[in-house]
Image (cartoon, helix red, strand yellow):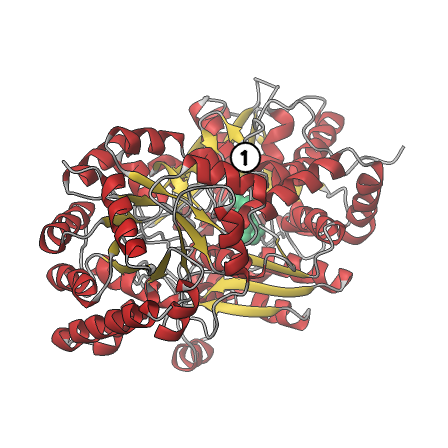
Amino acid sequence: MAPAFFVPDRTGRVPSAEGYFGAFGGRFIPEALVAAVEEVAVEFDKAKDDPSFAAELGELLRHYTGRPSAMTEVPRFARQAGGARVFLKREDLNHTGSHKINNVLGQALLTKRMGKTRVIAETGAGQHGVATATACALFGLDCTIYMGEIDTRRQALNVARMRILGAEVIAVASGSRTLKDAINEAFRDWVANVDSTHYLFGTVAGPHPFPAMVRDLHRVIGVEARGQLLERVGRLPDAAVACVGGGSNAIGLFHAFLDDPSVRLVGCEPGGLGPEEGRHAATLSVGEPGILHGSRSYVLQDEDGQITDTYSISAGLDYPGIGPEHAYLKDAGRAEYRAVTDDQAMQALRLLARTEGIIAAIESAHALAGALDVGRELGPDGVVLVNLSGRGDKDMDTAARYFGLYDQDQAEGEARGRTPDRVTPGEGNVR
Amino acid sequence: MTDGIASLAGALAQARAQDRAALIGYLPAGFPDLESGIDAIAALVEGGCDIVEVGLPHSDPVLDGPVIQAADDIALRGGLRIVDVLRTVREVRDRTGAPVLCMTYWNPVDRYGAERFAADLAAAGGAGCILPDLPVEESLAWRTAAKAHGLATVFVVAPSSQNERLATITAAGSGFVYAASLMGVTGARAKVGAQAADLVRRARLLTDLPVCVGLGVSDAEQAAEVAAFADGVIVGSAFVQCLLDAGTDTAAGLKALRELAGELATGMRRR
Ligand SMILES: Cc1ncc(COP(=O)(O)O)c(C=O)c1O
C-alpha cells in the first residue's frame, strides 16, 4: 500500500471543540469573520473523513511535492555535535523548497471545495508566499500575497518567484513592516472580501481551526521521519529539533513523537542579537500569555498589551507570536524551547554547507545550531533528528553580506546601488 | 458612580424623543497628543455628538484602515499609556457630561485585567466598552466584570451575521448594538453599504436595544441616509482625518471637528 501523506491527528486530545489547547488557542476575531472561519472548520472536518480528499492530496504530495522527503545523516557536521548522530528531515527538497507546501496544497484543495476563487496569504521569508502562489497557479486561483516591506527587500528572490508565478505581491509599510504586519494586512483584506476569498494562513497560529488544521497538514513530516529513523537506526531519536517562527514545521515534526516520552522535543527560537527588548523574537522564552492574530498564546508585549518590536536575521522567524499548541506543550513541560542567536544560526548554516554540501534556509539554521548543542548535551550515543525546513537559496544575499562573500567591487556596487539588508534591529520599526 | 448603561440609554432616548438619531463620534486618546486629544473629543460633543467613543490605541489594529492606524501610531509613539486613556475618559466625561465609551482591542484589556479595567473605567466615569475582536463566545469574563461595574458591552454585528447569531449576540450585549454597515475595516467610503438597512431591520426583530450603524459614514449626506433607518450614526475616520489634515495647527483641527460634528448632526435632523 502506498504510504499515507495526509495523516491528521485522530486522538482528538487537543484542541477542544472551541479550539483550546489547555489555556491557549480559541477564536478572537471580528464578527465579520466568524462565519468564514467556521466554514473553514466545518469544511476541514468533512475533508478529514473524506477518503477522496486524502487521495487527492496524497497524489499531489507524492507526484507534485515529491514526498516522502528524504532523510539524510550528516556525520561530518555531527563532529561538532559531541559525536551524536544527526539526521536531517529534508523538507528543503520539497517542491518550492520548504515544508510550507504541505499545508498550502491541503488548504488550496479546501479553497476549491468551498467554491472560493481568490486566495490571500501572508509571508515572512517568502516561502509560504511562494508555495501559495504555486498552488494558485496550479489550481487557477487569484492570488495576493502580503509581505512586510523589510522582508520584500531581504527576501527579494522570493518576491520575484511569486510574481513570475502570477501572484500579486503587496509590500506592507505599516507597523514594523515585517511578518506581523503582513498578517494584519491580510486580515484587513479578508474582512472586506470574505465571500470570494480564503485566507490561506501559513502557520499553526491564528484563530481556531487554523492551529489544528495546519498542524494536521504538516503531521506527515514527523510521521515519515519516525518511520525512516526506525528503519535506519532501529530506534527513536533522543531529541527532535526544529526552528519555531509561528511553529508549523516544529509541530509537524513533534507531533508524531508526543507519546514517546524518551524523545525530547526542542524548539529553537530566534535569539537575534540578545535578550533585550527589540533585539530578538524569542516569544516562548521571553513572552507572556496574550492575544495576537486571533488566538491566545505567548506574545511579546509590554505592560499595556501592546505588541513589542522584534528582530531576527531570519525573516521567517521574526514574529512576536507563536502557535497556541506550542504554548500548551511548553507549559505542560512536554516540549522545551531555547533561543539561538543570529550568529549561532549563521555559523551552523556555513558549517552544514561546508561539511555536507547542503545550504539551509536561515530559519532552519536555527534548528541546526540548536542540534549542535543538544548533541553535545546527549554525548556520543545520542541520536538527534533535525527538521531542515527549507533551503537557503533565498538567503544567499544575506549570507554573502554576513560572511563578506562578495568580491570587493561587487560589494561596493551593492552598497551603493541597493537598499541595505536588515542587519540591525529597529531599522524598520515605526513604533 | 453613575451607571454607564443608564447614561447611554438616557442619551439615546433623548435623541429619540427629539425624533432624530443619535450622533456617536470616535477619536483615539492621545491623538494628536494627550491634552489636545482631550480637547478634541470634547469638541465632538460641543459640535453635536450625543455620545463619544474614546479609542485605546493598539499596536496592531487589524480592524482599522489607514486613517485610524495613523492616529494610533501617533498616539503610541507619543508614549500614550492605558492610565492616560482612563484620564481622557474622566476629563471628557467631566467636561461634557456625555456618555463616554471605550473602544479597543481585547489584548490591552486582557493584559490590564478585565476586572481591573472595568473597575477603573467605571471609576473614570466610562459608560462601557466596544471590543470588536472579542466575539460573544469568548466574552464571558469581560461581560461579568462589566456588569459588576454597571458598564455596557456593545457588540458589533456584521452583514454576515446570520439571525441565530444575531439573537445570541444581541442578547449578550447592552447599551446598543453596533451594526457594521459593510464588510470591511474602518475608513471613509464613497457609499454606505446597502446591507446596512437590512442588518438593522433584522437586528430590530431580535432585540429592544437601540441599533446604531458605523463604518464608512463620513459626511452629512451619508449620516442623514443612515439616520433614516438607525437609532444612531457612528463616525470615526472622518473625525480623525480632520485632525490629520490640520497637522500641527490644533486650533484649526478643533474647529474642523466642531464643524463636521455640527454638519452631521444637522443633516441627521432633517429626517
Ligand atoms: C524554511 C522555513 N522554516 C521555518 C519557517 C518558520 O515558520 P514555522 O515556524 O511556521 O515553521 C519559515 C517561515 O517562513 C520558513 O520559510
Question: Residue visible at 60% across and 40% down?
Answer: A387
Q: Chain of mark 1?
A: A
Near-viewer residue (B219 or B251): B219
Q: Quadrant of the N terminus of chain A?
A: top right
Question: Residue visible at 21% across and 37% down?
Answer: B3
Q: Secondary structure at mark 1?
A: strand
Near-viewer residue (A367 or B196): B196
Residue A120 picture location, percent across and down: 60, 59
Judge whether B111 appears above or below A264 on screen.
below
Q: Is residue A99 visible?
A: yes
Residue B51 picture location, percent across and down: 25, 55
Answer with left or right where residue A45 lies relative to residue B157.
right
Residue A71 picture location, percent across and down: 70, 39
Near-viewer residue (A201 or A127): A201
Judge whether A407 appears above or below B136 on screen.
below
Q: Quadrant of residue B173?
A: top left
Ligand 1 has an atom within 8 Å of the beta carbon of the residue at disc 1: no
Judge whether A41 appears above or below A333 on screen.
below
Amino acid at circle 1: Val
Location of mark 1 (residue): A241
**Is the residue marked by circle 1 packed among few (<14), some (14-19), or many (20+) residues within 10 Å?**
many
Q: How many marks?
A: 1
Q: Is residue A301 visible?
A: no
Judge whether B27 appears above or below A270 on screen.
below
Answer with left or right where residue A56 lies relative to residue A187.
right
Q: Quadrant of residue A143?
A: bottom right
Question: Residue visible at 50% across and 63% down?
Answer: A147
